[in-house]
Amino acid sequence: MNAFIDKHAAKITGTLSCFDRVLIKGYLPICSAEGMMAFLSRQGILLKELKSFAPQQAKQLKAHAESLARRLGRPYRYLPNGGIRKEDLVGEILRTDPVEEGLICVLAAVEGCRSFRIAYREGCPRLRSARRKCLCLYFYYLDRAFGLMHVRIQTWLPLDIQVCLNGHDWLARKMDRHGLAYRRVDNAFHWLADLSRAQRFADRFTDLNWPRILHAFARRVCPLLKDLLASMEYYWVVDQAEYATDVLFKDRASLKGLYEKLLLHATLCFSAEDVLTFLGRKLHGNFAGEVLNDCKKRLPGARIKHRMKSNWIKMYDKHGLVLRIETVINHPYEFKVRRMGRRKGQEVMGWYPMTKGVGRFYRYAEVAAAANRRYLEALAAVDDPAQAVGKLTKLCEPATYGGRKRRGLHPLRKDDRELFRAVLRGEHAVGGFCNRDIAKHLLPGRSSDPAERRRQSARITRRIQLLRAHGLVAKIPRSRRYRLTSLGLTLMTASIYLQEMTMPELIRQLAA
């Protein structure tokens, strides 16, 4: 990320990384069929009585919501169809009937939910999980700490809860309490009086006592936690987390021209290997899933999304003032966290798939921040090709390496261009590359004869030495691997850009 910031330092006022939209879900011990059957047994309720027991609890939840809205003088509205956007309706209510803090409104809608059914075909009747529809209640709040948020609870057992928060709202209220000045448009800060202090505040989001905070939200909307379910607490998981890195530009003119180049580069140049690298993964034969690039125009601009299975990374601009790189984690099991796990029958500390529990919030931030940083580092290669012409000219001149004179590199030569492409591949961005990594792209049909393979390996070594002579790559200490230098990233990318984008456009203009 520093390479991108350093390159465009004259246009940028700073960066800010924090959580954006966060979706947390809560599950009671009765969320499984076995847990629900054990609960009914303790209550002395037969399975056949569940059909009358469950509607009674649903009526109690609905009556509580109506009573709460009536007592606070806030609207309770039933939405008869799914065509109404709830956020728009809440915004309209706030404009016509504003509130400074507390409940905004309660919205009710019939939606799909996770519940149970009684299975009779397996001997003794048992409960089985099933998808159903029930009345779901949305409690929208202007919370003192979290700003605009909502809590959704399904009225049918097992009473799953969803809490939706926004990290930018939380950060804004945190800065308000500490007297830190800022300017904000929508959910983006385009100016901050003290960026380093704001970043320290944003980093504390993961350190909050999330189980206590979320349980307090649950008790607001579920009266059953005070009597029937008094012995239970929700288990909270992060269902979706958006983590954004915002690059703050001085004005719209500074970002506009650059963003068009960034969008074009990300659309045309980032491959599947690049996307996996950004998200901390490597492409291998056992990888099963889709990796897609999706670019869409939207008012007032455009955004690009790179998706790996259920996780993705996005780039878009916010009101022409902020360049936002955002990693969205829906399926954390694709990533690793250091924790206790079982290996060969023993509990040992190691790197295991990341789980959804809110206790792993800190790891969500680490993974997403690293992905955003890699993405911005890759975008550091984007520049005006005209600025690299002088350096490209010098690249064509001979250079010296190891006391020997080496030929110049010619960006228009096919073999040099293929070498540039092989070295620039995103799979090398994290761990660098070795002779074998380059050979599999330049010599895909490698010989099985050992002597011929040694000659091919020596040929690749000479080409890597050629890149080292011109300062385009450097050796990683105490290893047989190499990494790109900032000069190499700039010149090789500019070379390919000139060959494939600028020159064809000039030829078309001359022909016209």
Image (tube, helix red, strand yellow):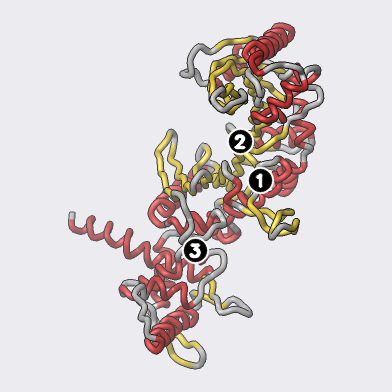
- Which residue shows up at 49% across the image and 63% down it? 427
Q: Residue furthest bottom?
A: 403
Q: Is residue 353 in view?
A: yes
Name the disc covering residue 355, or none. 1
Q: Residue at x 46, y 72 (%)?
A: 437
Q: Quick one: label 3, few (<14), some, or many (20+) residues within 10 Å?
A: many
Q: Residue 509: percent from the left, percent from the top?
A: 23, 55
- Which of the two labelled residues, at mark 2 and mark 3, occupies the earlier sequence position? 2
Question: Measured from the top left, where is residue 187 in percent x and y?
Answer: 60, 34
Quadrant of the frame with the N terminus: bottom right
Q: Amino acid at mark 1?
A: Thr
| Vertical comparison of 210 with 72: above or below | below
Q: Quadrant of the C terminus?
A: bottom left
Mark 3, residue position: 427
Asked whether the beta carbons under mark 3 and mark 1 sit within 8 Å of each other, the answer is no
Cα gap from disc 2 to disc 3, whole angstroms: 29 Å
Residue placed most toward the observer, 512 or 410: 410
Residue 360 occupies quadrant: top right
The three-letter code of the residue at mark 3 reads Glu
Question: Which SS class for mark 2?
Answer: strand
